[in-house]
Amino acid sequence: MMQTIFGYLEQHKREMKETLIRLVEAESPSRNKLLSDRCGQVLADLFEELVGGQIEKIEKESVGNQYRFSIGSGQEQILIIGHYDTVWDQAAIPLHEEDGILYGPGVFDMKGGLTVTLWALKALKSTGVDLNKKIVFLVTSDEEIGSLHSRALIEEEARKSELVLVPESSISNSGAVKTFRKGIGIFKIEVTGTAVHAGINPWEGVSAIDELVLQLQEIKKLDNREAGISINIGTISGGTRTNVVADHAEAMIDVRFTTKAQGQMLDAAIRSCLSFIPRAVIDITGNINRYPMEETKEVLTLFSELKEIAAGHGYVLQNGGSGGASDGNFTATLGIPTIDGLGPMGDGAHAVNEHVLLKNLPYRAALIAELLERKLT
């Protein structure tokens, strides 16, 4: 009798843990190319050892090298996307295990997801599933800093694919997968005024700070909790000293939204700001970095299949969303059905308590592998 995918993974849960530890030990801060490249090589070595498919290294100059792994053959393609870079500087937090929980830099976001993907692919091959479609596992190195060096590659592969799976971190504690994500835009507003003495002739100057305050008050009017639109004034700076009318001020703004139409509206509204104070000059830069991963009918169909698979293993899989964005936003915007948050249960992304539940690794790998099995038949 052929071994089941989940049975195979349960038998190898110790090796899954070892895989995850190897990846976390290979620290990979986004802006440290040397360390990132070492981690990328560890990932490539693991793919060769566990899966044995095709490996393409994509050289990058200023960030870590990226990898396109693939198995199977055929005209149709399924894409899995992930990233190995983390927000942590080298040696910022320790790797350690307590009571079946593994703590460490990037263990939840998203080396746990890379681990379950590697083992999902290994399980497919080891249990004899017919790989009659191409499965591409694309792993990038700059997701945490905006994906500027990988977006074109992600979109290129997505256009070839019938669906996209994203083993990013699941929703904290519940393990729910993500069927929607908000979009994000980042804008910078700079105001130039005219400096004069604040006591002798204040009304002859133009306060850049006064103008910026008025601009930010106007932009905050776009905030709409019911519609899922948030406007965060992240940083403000300006002026030189208290007795000088400020001739420069600037602010960085983060906007989040739930639909593409909202993003387009926010972009147009922010870019069309006019000065309130005569002679104040406004310069607005930035853009919509990612449009939302919207919860479409196709995405909910994928979730229904995952929920059925989970039920077969005795647990209830939930779905939800996130105010944070991922590379899945790019693929979803292209109209490719995309489901996210397929990584293992855990918590603490970008926090000192970042961790995953080790006992959950076989379940999450089986979730991915059994969904792929359905799509391959």
Image (spheres, grey):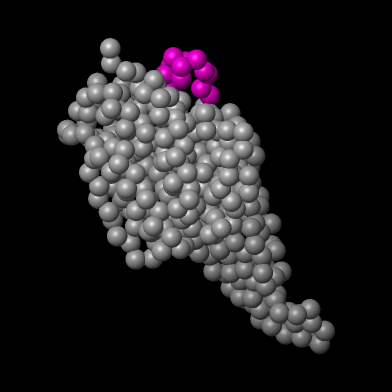
Q: In this image, 45 relative to 247: left or right?
A: left
Q: Residue furthest top?
A: 1
| 268 up-or-down from 321: above or below | below
**Quick check: is 40 in the magenta stretch?**
no
Residue sitting at x 24%, y 23%: 128
Q: Which of these two is toward me, 41 or 303?
A: 41
Seen from the viewer's position, the closer of residues 219 and 358 is 358
| Vertical order, 277 against 123 (above or below) | below
Quadrant where the N terminus sits is: top left
The relative height of residue 127 versus residue 113 in the rendered view (above or below) is above
314 magenta-colored? yes
**Residue at left offset 64%, top offset 58%:** 234
Q: In this rendering, does residue 291 appear at all?
A: no
Front residue (pair 73, 268): 73
The image position of residue 116, as x and y in percent, is: 42, 35
Q: Is residue 252 visible?
A: yes
Q: Which residues are magenta?
A: 301-318
* Quarter of the view holding residue 101: top right
